[in-house]
Amino acid sequence: MVTGIDRVVIDELSALDRSRQAMVAIKLPETTIVAINTAGEALFGVAAARLIGRHASSLFHGTDEVHASVALSALASGAIDSYCARRRMVNRPNAEVWTSVRTFMIAGTRIAVGLAVPADAPRPLDGVETEVRALRGDVWPSPGGFADADVGASPASSAPVFEALDSLPARQREIVAALLQGKRTAGIAREMFVSESTVRSHLSAIFKAFGVKSQTQLITLLRSRATGSLGEATSRHR
């Protein structure tokens, strides 16, 4: 089913529900899920009603959720317009999907539309725009052109970022993801059931791993790195 927050936007997204492929719509810059079609519900194993309004990284599992937060943050900041990566699903941590995401302007709102296919299917480099064209008979206007779905920073510039991310303990990766979702130290401490001083101690270690001195520098670094090597980084971690 297609449902969501902004009626005008959701009306424009009605094409998603006609697709037999798993499609998810994400509102930017909040990076919250505003629509998911029935094919998406079946693939991810989660009802749309449980997903609407949640951060889009919640579709993925473990380290992949943190990588998704980085990629979505880069989309929200305008650093990239698209990406393609292989990830593990949250309800099926042993199953993987290729997910291809592109941004569009719909009714004056920036929307990221994701297409997911099982990992044993061909990688969907241009699947989103091709599917939209087939459903609507035209192409949604996008912020920029797309050569392919790996648009962004080169692997040479982004690989060290994901290597540093993967080297962190699980708790510290969770903190990085929370920061990218706009959460503050006090809120992170409450969610993790630890003291704020513990969170600050973790932050010091995180800053050292990335060679930065503040949360602002860390977020700027992660948002400025696109996801050209995201799939490779995820594969290295598995």
Image (tube, rainbow, N blue to C red):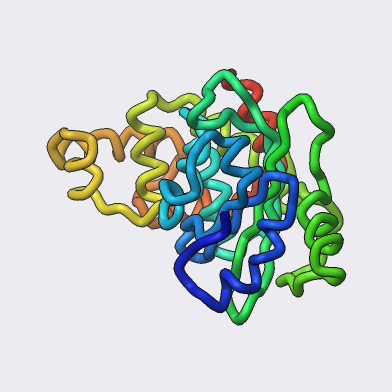
Left/right placement of residue 172 relative to residue 195 reads right
- Which residue does the image show at 52% across and 46% down from the upper left? 70
Residue 142's image quarter?
bottom right
- Which residue does the image show at 43% across and 33% down from the upper left? 209
Tell me: residue 76, above or below residue 138.
above
- Which residue does the image show at 57% across and 52% down from the upper left? 36
Left/right placement of residue 82 relative to residue 210 reads right
Quadrant in which the N terminus appears? bottom right
Picture coordinates of residue 207, whole percent (x, y): 38, 40
Tell me: residue 117, above or below residue 115.
above
- Which residue does the image show at 77% across and 25% down from the upper left? 120
Tell me: residue 164, above or below residue 125.
above
Quadrant in which the C terminus appears? top right
Left/right placement of residue 215 relative to residue 86 reads left
Tell me: residue 86, above or below residue 224.
above
Instruction: Work out whether residue 2 can be spotted.
Output: yes
Residue 195's image quarter?
top left
Residue closer to the observer: 221 or 71: 71
Picture coordinates of residue 185, whole percent (x, y): 23, 48
Count of numbered badges drawn on the protein: 0
Left/right placement of residue 74 relative to residue 113 reads left
Residue closer to the observer: 25 or 66: 25
Picture coordinates of residue 206, whole percent (x, y): 37, 36
Instruction: Work out whether residue 26 can be spotted.
Output: no
Picture coordinates of residue 125, whole percent (x, y): 81, 45
